[in-house]
Image (cartoon, rainbow, N blue to C red):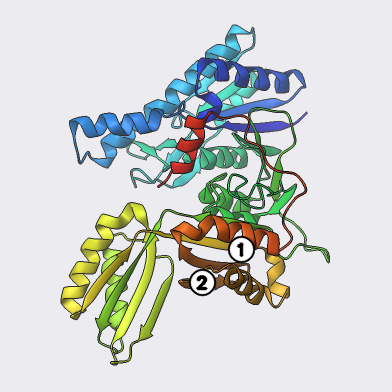
Amino acid sequence: MALIVAKFGGTSVASPERIQKVAQRLIAKKQEGHDVVAVVSAMGKTTDELVALAASVNTSPAKREMDMLLSTGEQVSMALLAMAIQARGYQAVSYTGWQAGIATDDNYSSAKIDNIDTHRIREGLETGAIVVVAGFQGITTEGDITTLGRGGSDTTAVALACGISADVCEIYSDVDGIYSADPRVAPRARKLDVVSYDDMLELSSEGAGVLQARAVEFARKYKVVIHSRSAFSDAEGTLIKEVAPSMEQAVISGIAHDTSEMKITMRGLHDEPGIAAKVFSILASNNVSVDMIIQNVSTDGKANISFTFPGSQKENAMEAVNRAAEMLDASQILIDENIAKVSLVGTGMKSSPGVAARAFKTLAENEINILMISTSPIRISVVVDGSQVEAAVRCLHTAFGLDSDTIFEETQLSAEEIAAKMNKGR
């Protein structure tokens, strides 16, 4: 008998019919003798609908009130799922994030978990019930509701798995595991049986949308085994866990891409110590998360600085850059919204020379120009023109021997749901 935390995403509970299927899956686990805690996201597009509803009454709502509003989406899912389980003659009890003992700081809309008191969950399990918890939310020491940011239900599930010492944290979504690349972009991508915490953290951070990076980081810190699998089949998925290095370890585990970033270039800055510090201090004060940076000196002795950042922060970034340009006497500001980042990830590259050379040669042979480069011991990221991102992913995937013999086919989602998933986070 195992203790299992099972998290179901928005598409998995998008309709009453799908909620019934989740209930059946959880009951099957209970029938096998397992203790089960389920974590659920809001149904389908509920969160987006609530955001739009808020905008209809206030274009700049307070973050505290937004958290109060957005937390209701998961509460609907948890109650309906508990009802569906009970209708089949099995015990179930639902808890909000705060009833489940998830205590957070007061950073509304992106709160961090401080601690978890799992006594109510354990009490529910002791009665034989399937415990259903609303993901994405917690409570401050002052009693205010908070949310954990987009994708925060993954973090809820991993945190609860840690808190109750679960044997595994199963993350159910509309894909059947972690692939070597987005299979909708690289149809010959192959599903991975096992991925290390380090590789998964890089893949998630660089654009792979299957798991939230915070959840992976939490799992790595507390050694929580994650099983990423499909909500629509019983097939085995991908395990994310501590992986011992082997002599046959692949150089590259996977390729991630991100089309949500933008690039700003400041030209004509004075080439003197402290200029970059001033630019990025202003950006930091305006809550802009800078990713990749390039600084060089032009022929006239002036300095140019280029950097990338999340497109969602465009307004803050432009405000900060305009202020910095006026203060530092920059001659020109350029913004490029049509860029994409492609990242090769693999702990094997630490001991494999020539990875960068092969990647750059492959891109050159396919006439894909590199705009920026960033590296770490287990990652190489390049920025390319947005129109070339899919070609870049496919040619690199082939060049590093990641292609499978079969072609991926999307079978579970409607065209509307696929489009919504592809646009999520942009």
Residue 380 placement (x, y as % from top left): 58, 68
Whichever of callouts 1 and 2 sits on the residue coming sooner in the sequence is 1
Give the quadrant of the N terminus. top right
| Vertical comparison of 97 with 78: above or below | below
Residue that appears at 52% across and 43% down: 155
Residue nearest the viewer, comparing 226 with 177? 177
Q: Does residue 119 appear left or right of residue 1 in this picture?
A: left
Q: Quadrant of residue 261?
A: bottom left
| Vertical comparison of 77 with 314: above or below | above
Badge 2: few (under 14), some or many (20 or more) residues near its Cα, within 10 Å? Answer: some
Residue 329 placement (x, y as % from top left): 18, 80
Residue nearest the viewer, comparing 201 with 251? 251
Picture disc at residue 344: 1
Residue that appears at 56% across and 13% down: 84
Q: Does residue 34 appear left or right of residue 217 in this picture?
A: right
Residue type for callout 2 = Ser
| Vertical comparison of 282 with 259: above or below | below
Q: In the displayed image of the protein, which residue is found farthest to the right?
A: 247
Residue 71 placement (x, y as % from top left): 38, 31
Picture disc at residue 30: none
Residue that appears at 24% across and 62% down: 318
Task: Give how far apart the Cα atoms at labels 1 and 2 are.
Answer: 11 Å
Residue type for callout 1 = Leu
- Report which residue position mark 2 lands on: 374
Badge 1: few (under 14), some or many (20 or more) residues near its Cα, within 10 Å? Answer: many
Q: Are marks 1 and 2 in contact (CB under 8 Å)?
A: no
Residue 25 placement (x, y as % from top left): 67, 21
Q: Secondary structure at mark 2?
A: strand
Q: Secondary structure at mark 1?
A: strand
